[in-house]
């Protein structure tokens, strides 16, 4: 009896457990059913919302259809401004080329699709003025067009552009964009289409393809661009110079630069004069080099460039050319004129010319010049004329207000024992002289540590920096 009671109790326990399992299963099924119902309700609400938006958009477009002006007028007369305003807002959301370009650059290419959409929209409008403005905007600098070429190369929106090109519905902007497609079989016909109707604003896109990695594409672009440059340099040389010189840094850019020089050698001088006025310094230097090799410059024009041009590189080259011509022809007056200008790079060429003609006495007077190269030329002239440059410097720095060039010259040519005349200058009232004296003592390896250490608290930052640098050299 006792054993049967135990067995009955075990059976009852298992029954309770089975009931608990059944209850949990029921609860799980209920949760799943509620989740399914909630998802279905959410999907239904999304479908309703989507259908509502589509119906609204369709109603807006129907109400403002071109063939139904009466309905539009009727809605306006009833005061129904909402539909028309909604339509105008929808159209206003389309970004202009300027806004799309700014968004593309700020996103570093992630939003380049917006720019492609804006350019295609302008291209489809057929407005020549807007198309020209868009070209000018995206080709403003060589760096910009090269950056955009990399941005939209793998943009999905270019697949639609390629389709327009295949069916013959691509305008100039769309064709130019297609020339940057990642598929060479799209780029090649795009380049061919651009060359069929050449215009200066498309030239940057052709120059990019001259450096293309696909030989069929680059060959077509190179052949077409060379023909344009040599047949009409007045139109295309100026447009090509800035971009081609920029692309010359690429691995395949050397060919284009060489052809640019070849076309420039045969170009009218008026074209090169225009290039000399370019805002791009590389273009100005390119034009100057070509004109120099062609011997286009008059002697007086070279003098003017050496004295007044804003580009240091052109001043140097013009000064060298003038000094060389002056030495050959014995024009000492011209060399003296250049030696008196305030550009040290031009004065060096003039003084070198005077030295070649034997006018050393005029150069010795520049031992304390502000330019280190001119001081070196003056010391060489002093040696040739028997003047002791170091003694001259010691005397010069012993005055009440020595020049900075004299202090620097003593440091350049003296020894450690020549630093004694500089010690009083450490207490000079002019901060620039104190700093120059400390620097000269450091170069001579004759720094008086005690005196210079107190200069760390000098009110002039220039002096403090020089003192710290001098003390660091003694550590």
Image (cartoon, grey):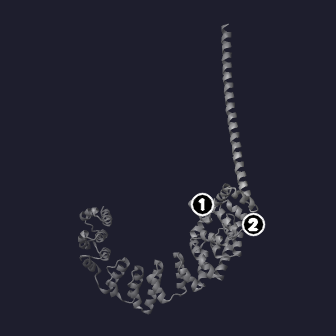
Q: Is residue 341 visible?
A: yes
**Which residue has dot 2 on it?**
166
Q: Is residue 209 visible?
A: no
The residue lying at 59 percent from left, 63 percent from top is 99
Question: Label 1 neighbourhood size at 10 Å, few (<14), some (14-19), many (20+)?
Answer: some
Dot 2 or dot 1: first in sequence order is: 1
Question: Label 2 neighbourhood size at 10 Å, few (<14), some (14-19), many (20+)?
Answer: few
Q: Residue furthest front?
A: 77
Where residue 118 appears, as percent x and y from the top left, is: 65, 63
Where residue 195 appears, as percent x and y from the top left, is: 69, 75
Compared across the picture, whether 379 is left or right of 140 comes to: left
- The quarter of the rendered structure image containing the N terminus is top right
**Which residue has dot 1 on it?**
109
| Residue nearest the viewer, comparing 14 with 84 | 84
Where residue 44 appears, as percent x and y from the top left, is: 71, 42
Between the C-alphas of marks 2 and 1, the distance is 26 Å
């Amino acid at each position: 009896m006792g054993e049967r009671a135990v067995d009955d109790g075990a059976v009852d326990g298992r029954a309770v457990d089975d009931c608990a399992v059944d209850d949990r299963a029921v609860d799980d099924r209920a949760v799943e059913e509620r989740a399914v119902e909630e998802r279905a309700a959410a999907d239904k609400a999304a479908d309703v919302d989507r259908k509502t938006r589509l119906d609204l958009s369709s109603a807006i477009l129907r109400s403002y259809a071109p063939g139904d002006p009466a309905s539009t007028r009727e809605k306006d007369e009833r005061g129904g401004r909402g539909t028309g305003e909604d339509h105008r807002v929808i159209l206003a959301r389309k970004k202009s080329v300027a806004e799309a370009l700014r968004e593309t650059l700020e996103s570093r290419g992630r939003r380049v699709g917006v720019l492609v959409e804006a350019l295609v929209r302008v291209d489809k409008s057929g407005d020549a003025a807007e198309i020209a403005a868009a070209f000018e905007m995206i080709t403003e600098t060589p760096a910009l067009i090269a950056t955009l070429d990399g941005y939209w190369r793998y943009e999905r929106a270019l697949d639609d552009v390629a389709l327009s090109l295949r069916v013959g519905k691509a305008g100039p902007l769309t064709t130019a964009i297609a020339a940057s497609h990642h598929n060479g079989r799209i780029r090649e016909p795009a380049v061919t289409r651009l060359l069929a109707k050449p215009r200066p604003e498309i030239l940057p896109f052709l120059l990019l393809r001259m450096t293309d990695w696909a030989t069929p594409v680059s060959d077509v672009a190179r052949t077409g661009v060379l023909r344009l440059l040599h047949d009409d340099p007045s139109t295309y040389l100026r447009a090509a110079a800035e971009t081609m010189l920029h692309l010359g840094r690429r691995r395949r850019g050397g060919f284009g630069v060489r052809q640019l020089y070849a076309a420039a050698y045969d170009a009218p001088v008026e074209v090169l004069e225009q290039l000399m006025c370019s805002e791009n310094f590389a273009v100005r230097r390119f034009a100057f080099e070509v004109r120099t090799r062609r011997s286009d410059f008059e002697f007086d024009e070279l003098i003017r460039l050496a004295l007044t041009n804003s580009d240091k590189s052109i001043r140097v080259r013009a000064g060298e050319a003038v000094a060389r011509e002056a030495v050959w022809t014995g024009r000492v007056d011209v060399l003296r004129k250049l030696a008196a200008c305030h550009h040290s790079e031009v004065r060096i060429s003039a003084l070198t010319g005077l030295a070649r003609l034997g006018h050393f006495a005029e150069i010795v007077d520049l031992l304390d010049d502000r330019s280190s190269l001119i001081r070196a030329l003056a010391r060489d002239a002093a040696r040739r004329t028997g003047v002791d440059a170091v003694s001259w410097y010691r005397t010069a720095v012993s005055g009440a207000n020595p020049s900075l060039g004299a202090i620097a010259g003593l440091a350049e040519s003296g020894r450690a024992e020549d630093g004694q005349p500089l010690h009083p200058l450490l207490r000079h009232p002019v901060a620039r002289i104190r700093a120059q004296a400390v620097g000269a003592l450091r170069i001579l390896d004759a720094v008086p540590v005690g005196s210079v250490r107190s200069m760390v608290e000098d009110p002039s930052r220039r002096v403090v920096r020089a003192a710290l640098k001098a003390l660091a050299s003694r550590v």
